[in-house]
Amino acid sequence: MSEQVSTIAMADAAKPSGVRWKIFLLMLFLISINYIDRASLSVAMPVIAKEFDIDPAMQGLILSSFFWTYALMQVPGGMLADRFKPRIVIALATLFWGFFQALAALSTSWMLLLMTRLGLGASEAPIYPAGGKLNAIWMTQTERGRGATLLDGGAPLGAALGSIVIAWLMAAFSSWRVAFVVAGIGTMLCGLWAWYYIRNVPREHPSVNEAEARYLEEAHAIEDAATPPSSGASGIAYFRFRSVWCMCLGWMFFNTTFYGLLTWMPTYLFKVHGFDIKALGGASFIIFFAGFVGELVGGWIGDGWRARGGAPNTVFRTLFGIAAIMATVSIFLVAYVTNAVAVVVLLSTTLFFLRWCGMYWAIPSALAGRGKSGFLGGCMNLGGNIAGITTPLIVGFIVQATGSYFLALMYFAAAGIALLICSTLIDYSRKLPV
């Protein structure tokens, strides 16, 4: 009997413990909280705009203000993750953005609200570059697609949950301020959880067994053997390569459509299709949850294809191409459909395929390796959040100038075509000699 128990114990010990997947489920949760906090203002904007007497152009300014500091801090956030490792960066970022989310509830004017959004943007900025760094440290080459989509899947999931949770809290308490306080306090508690569970190196984690540590070390050793030696050049040298420019621009065009929907879709459904606050929360949940499901499906397809021997260029160019084409066609059709149910279906289709591009978060480690993946991820997300700054403003001015959302939807469709071009021009097959 004792021999049988010993044999079972040895078999269990030979199985990798899977802590890396639990860490990325935690990151999925943190990014979801991140986007609940971001989406809260978009959901509450119809009420806040009436309270503070804000016109559409000024609404666009406030919605974009988050991205000013968020974009500015992307590269510094990635450099912090490279230097101080992701654990402390993720924990502190989460604590501080929760503080600013709760502080927004005290706003008595649009100016004070804008100031809290600037603080929220600066605080949230390091989370994605640090998450990309975790992906390089904790995942193998055939797992990083799923790691990337778990990391980035929090965006549509958080937007979906944010829409329905914030809308429910606003309806239950008749106050957008209470909703913001609850979200902020919950976020700060999650920051403490992140510090408790995340580790910078697999062998530092108390729950990682020898099999998982060895599995990751062996996979990384094979990857490192194929990596060209460092030239000792600064990170700026990466911008000699077309792939880096196309990565940053592709992520910018992806975010043009996603952030446009995140910031303006609730108001669009409210004004154009007559959704009340409860219907708005339900429709937004359906649309963004479709994006979450699509993101996980894309990562599963990508990693499965890679594990079966698919060449990186074939896999990524095909999947990103399908995503861009389907999202473009769907968002284009939204402009010509008047039935509210059909609009929700088309927007859900748009996000289902668009979010396959969450696998972009596997690109920094594919191009730069683990050493500088934080920096390159910060550069990529800087490009993405240039769209975060400009898109709400552009849509606000289009709506105010034309009284219609038609040209805004055409703007999103054009971004989808540009995403297709950029994704096709990236070379995913080799690390850059920097």
Image (cartoon, rainbow, N blue to C red):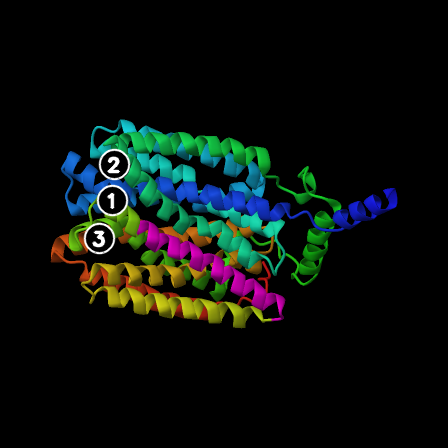
Instruction: Please state which of residues 414 and 264 is positioned toward the viewer in this rendering.
Output: 264
Residues under numbered marks 1 and 2 in contact, where contact means CB atoms less than 8 Å apart: yes
Q: Nearer the viewer, residue 71 or 228?
A: 71
Is the stretch drawn in magenta largely helix, strand or loop? helix
| Circle 3 crowding by C-alpha within 10 Å: few under 14, some 14–19, many from 20 | some
Q: Nearer the viewer, mark 1 or mark 3?
A: 1
Give the structural element (helix, strand or loop) at label 2: helix
Residue under label 3, please give it.
269
Q: Residues within 10 Å of mark 2 (few under 14, many from 20)?
A: some
> In terms of depth relative to the viewer, which is nearer, 377 or 108?
108
The residue beneath circle 1 is 278
Residue 92 shown left or right of residue 117 in the figure: right
The disc labelled 2 sits on which kind of residue? Answer: Ala
Q: Residue 322: give its label.
A: none
Q: Nearer the viewer, residue 434 or 43?
A: 43
- Indicate which disc, 1 or 2, sits on the residue closer to the N terminus: 2
> Separation of disc 1 and disc 3 at Cα?
12 Å
Disc 3 versus disc 2: distance between alpha carbons? 18 Å
Which residues, given as a range, are shown in magenta?
A: 284-309
What amino acid is labelled 3 in the image? Leu
Residue under label 2: 171
Give coordinates of residue 308: x percent, y percent. 62, 69
Q: Please, what is the three-letter code of the amino acid marked with disc 1?
A: Lys
* Numbered disc 1: secondary structure: helix
- Residue 302 shown in magenta: yes
